[in-house]
Amino acid sequence: MIKIKHLLAIVTVLVLIGTGCTKNTSPVPDDEQEPTMDDLVIPFGFDFKSTKNVTVEINMPASLDFTNLRGRFDIYTNTPDQNGKLINSASFDQNGHYQGEITVPAYLNQIYVSSMAGDVLVDLPSDQLKSGGVIIDFGDDYGYNPPDTVIPSTKTLPLSFKNTKQAGAGINIIGNGDFSSNNFGTIPYWNASLTVDQKWHFTNYYNFTMQWVNDNGNGMIKTPVAGYSGYYYYGGAAQWVAAEPGDVITLTADIKSDGSNGNKYAYLYLIPRAANGNPLAYYNTYYSNPSSNWKTKSIVASMPSGTTHCTVLLWNNDYNSSGSIYYDNVTVSGPVVDSDNDGVSDEDDDYPNDAARAFNIYYPDANSFGSLAFEDNWPGKGDYDFNDAVIDYRYKQVVNSDNELVDLEALFKFKATGATFLNGFGFEMGMEPSDVASVSGTSLVDNYITTLANGTEAGQAKATIIVTDNIFTQLPNPGGGIGTNTTVGATYVSPATLTINLTTTNPVSRDIAGNPPYNPFIIVNEIRGREVHLSDHAPTSLIDNSYFGTLHDNSNPATGKYYKTANNLPWGIDIPEPFAYPVEKAQIINAHLKFASWAESGGILFTDWYQDLSGYRNAGNIYQIP
């Protein structure tokens, strides 16, 4: 039962909210009224998310042994040469498999995945509203048969493979990989014994061998135009490199064709050999009917027990006498260095001398910020300018080679507080408070927040970090106007940044810890039980549940509906880019002109509503830094 004193306090707060104590304005004649948020018809269940969660499953080729190897892959928003942003890095399990969830802008329709087995640009699910998934099998075009038994595959790869970044690559151990030197030997057959002499040897079938050409100073090799009987050619170029059991060897080459397409098959082979020269395995990948543009292909394999050498073979089944297959820029990366023995090579390890740490994972990315924007009149309806608290964020998760969270660094840039309330800000993670060893960097000055010795908030079932208990501490009101940095003509205050550093007691699965921005919220007017979260985000353990269902709040905890009005309007939004927030009293739909269509479509239309595109903004209603 609520104590009488406490009940009276809540009633007083609700009366003040109901009378709009924080932001009263003079009435405007009906014929001058702009559209309002109350006019919107929002589909039931829409949560105002500008992002989507995508499950990514990656399978590596069977040629790789992951008993000790962890490897690394990176996920970008696009190809790096197209300004793709790195948004995730992780490693594989002992089966060469990974499955995890990433959060990306709802408008994003592709991701670029870079691994030691190659790179791929893959389409994301087209449904912008629901979580979906992609499956990437890097070994789809891998074979395990010797050159004289391969049968060209006719299947079409479902993925768009691009240039390869050699994750985990060591030094280049091949000789004359750019074919700048016209110095080649010959062997009767691909299986002939060689020595490690940094020299290519052309196979010689019926006096037909591959040929060296000089294209304006650039050397390369190609298949002969007319092969055996003038109809076909099969053969290639081989070189031996030194190798030992467990070495991860990666072969990469640029390949193209000229003349007529069709009936051309280029293969890259890695063939580990025992001391007596006998092949131990055959790892290959193919490229059928190369185009006239250079394309990078690669093959990667772990050397099996007994390996002393490895044959690097460029093999061809060329059944078209009117054109050739060309090769250039061949690289073979050899044994890698892993100084801390965590299964991630020094080249790919962000912490090469620290076995407890391997990768930095940024959200939204290493060089950008996302934004949170809140209305603080809950449970009363806000004025929907979404500038009562505007906070940019960037998270850096430090994970180990098992993809578990070790450290967290969170930057919060406080840009605006168009409020008279003294509001706090924090976020809740999925792990327990005892999973946290320490938290530093918070600003707690008004003595209504109680913390544990580790810096997390006391009384919470989940680890909760109160970043600041009073945003005005970061953004003091300069005098004039409402709050700070929302009123046109008022003095501008430079945003203040707080950096939160969290260390876990023991590494925590990211599935448990959660993904940034986690569960952010504001605390209204230093009343600890009055929390405002994003739509359908559950409150923390310290919420005062008596607020739910009062005034304009239509939350239903039994069904998971939180922080929505009866017509499904929110009190908080999150976007994966810096928010150009409205000026004081300008509703968001009259500043960001596609917001209404986005919301009423349930997130299907204008998923990029917050961007600065033609017809998207009314600049007069958006706060401009003076």
Image (spheres, rainbow, N blue to C red):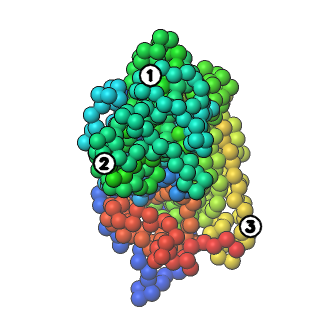
Q: As displayed, is residue 486 above or below residue 268?
A: below
Q: Secondary structure at mark 3?
A: loop
Q: Are marks 1 and 3 in contact (CB under 8 Å)?
A: no
- Point 69% across, 52% down: residue: 497
Describe residue 200's horizontal placement relative to residue 317 as left or right. right
Count of picture labels: 3
Do tag 1 and tag 2 residues touch (Cβ < 8 Å)? no
* Residue at the spot of label 1: 192
Residue at 62%, 24% (x, y): give it.
338
Which amino acid type is shown beneath numbered disc 3?
Pro
State whether residue 356 is above or below residue 112: above
134, 387: nearer the viewer: 134
Q: Closer to the observer: label 1 or label 3?
A: 1
Task: Kindly report the distance in space between the C-alpha atoms of the residues bearing marks 2 and 3.
Answer: 78 Å
Mark 2 and mark 3 lie on one chain; the one further toward the N terminus is 2
How crowded pointer 3 is (Cα within 10 Å; few <14, some 14-19, many 20+) is rated as some
Q: Residues within 10 Å of mark 2 (few under 14, many from 20)?
A: many
The residue lying toward the viewer, choosing from 403 and 161, is 161
Label 2, on which residue? 320
Mark 1 belongs to which amino acid? Ala
**Residue 354 spot, x, y in % from top left:** 66, 25
**Residue at 27% of width from left, 38% of height from top?**
153
Marks 1 and 3, the one that precedes in the sequence: 1
Which residue carries the number 3 mark?
478
Q: Residue furthest left?
A: 154
